[in-house]
């Protein structure tokens, strides 16, 4: 089967599925989603965000970035997608900064999951990549999401939290440590809902 024919068959299968089950193409409504997914609703919206990386061995001057972010539900209302665009400074160097964050709740693992993809370019540097998948738990009483991730290849683990101050403001901290427990990077920041 040629690639073109395969793609046509695949497209036909999606169209057939849509005719058989219209739910495939519509976004989920609140009745379709679990209470755990509804916790993530608080992130949906337009945000002004600031992130600061403390000086460290890799970035002796540290850095600061300012973003405009848009967070929305996607993939039938089961995944949050954050698209952030902004600018950053590291000493005299200025760069374009951007990231995409994907988050959800995995009912099999009984944990929140997230992954980030980032890119900063300009000022003589092109730096992009992704972080390892993180898992976490929501604490309703403290209004805090805590996460943990391990990058075995790099010998680094990270822990983070996002604390909600109120419906329109939250703060976050992510700390990365090496195998000896030494902090190799700490990122902190805050976000305010745009009105």
Image: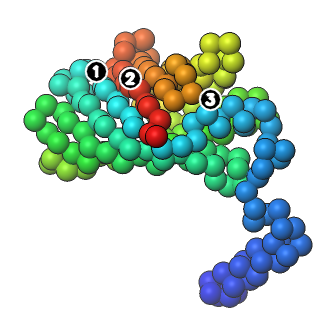
- Of badges 3 and 2, the one in the foreground is 2
Q: Residues within 10 Å of mark 2 (few under 14, many from 20)?
A: some
CB of mark 3 within 8 Å of CB of mark 2?
no
Q: Secondary structure at mark 1?
A: loop
Name the mark on residue 54.
1
Residue 23, x across and y down, in percent = 83, 62
Residue 143, x across and y down, in percent = 62, 18
Residue 182 in which image quadrant: top left
Please indicate, yes or no, whether residue 191 appears anywhere in the rendered image.
yes
Residue shown at the point (47%, 35%) measured from the top left: 193
- Of badges 2 and 1, the one in the foreground is 2
Alpha-carbon distance for marks 3 and 1?
24 Å
Q: Where's the N terminus, which quadrant? A: bottom right
**Residue 44 higher or lower than 52, as above or below:** below
Residue extending farthest left: 92
Q: Secondary structure at mark 3?
A: strand
**Residue 59 higher or lower than 126, as above or below:** above
């Amino acid at each position: 089967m040629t690639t073109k024919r395969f793609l046509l068959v695949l497209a036909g299968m999606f169209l057939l599925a849509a005719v058989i089950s219209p739910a495939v193409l519509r976004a989920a409504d609140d009745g379709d989603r679990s209470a755990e997914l509804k916790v993530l609703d608080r992130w949906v919206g337009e945000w002004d965000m600031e992130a600061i990386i403390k000086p460290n061995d890799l970035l002796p001057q540290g850095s600061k970035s300012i973003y405009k972010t848009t967070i929305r539900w996607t993939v039938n209302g089961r995944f949050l997608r954050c698209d952030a665009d902004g600018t950053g400074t590291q000493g005299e160097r200025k760069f374009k900064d951007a990231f995409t964050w994907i988050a959800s709740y995995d009912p099999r693992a009984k944990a929140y999951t997230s992954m980030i993809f980032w890119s900063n370019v300009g000022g003589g540097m092109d730096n992009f990549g992704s972080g390892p998948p993180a898992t976490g738990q929501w604490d309703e009483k403290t209004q805090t999401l805590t996460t943990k991730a391990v990058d075995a290849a790099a010998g680094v683990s990270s822990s983070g939290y996002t604390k909600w101050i109120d419906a329109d403001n939250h703060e976050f901290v992510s700390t990365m440590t090496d195998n000896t427990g030494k902090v190799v990077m700490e990122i902190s920041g805050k976000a305010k809902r745009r009105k």
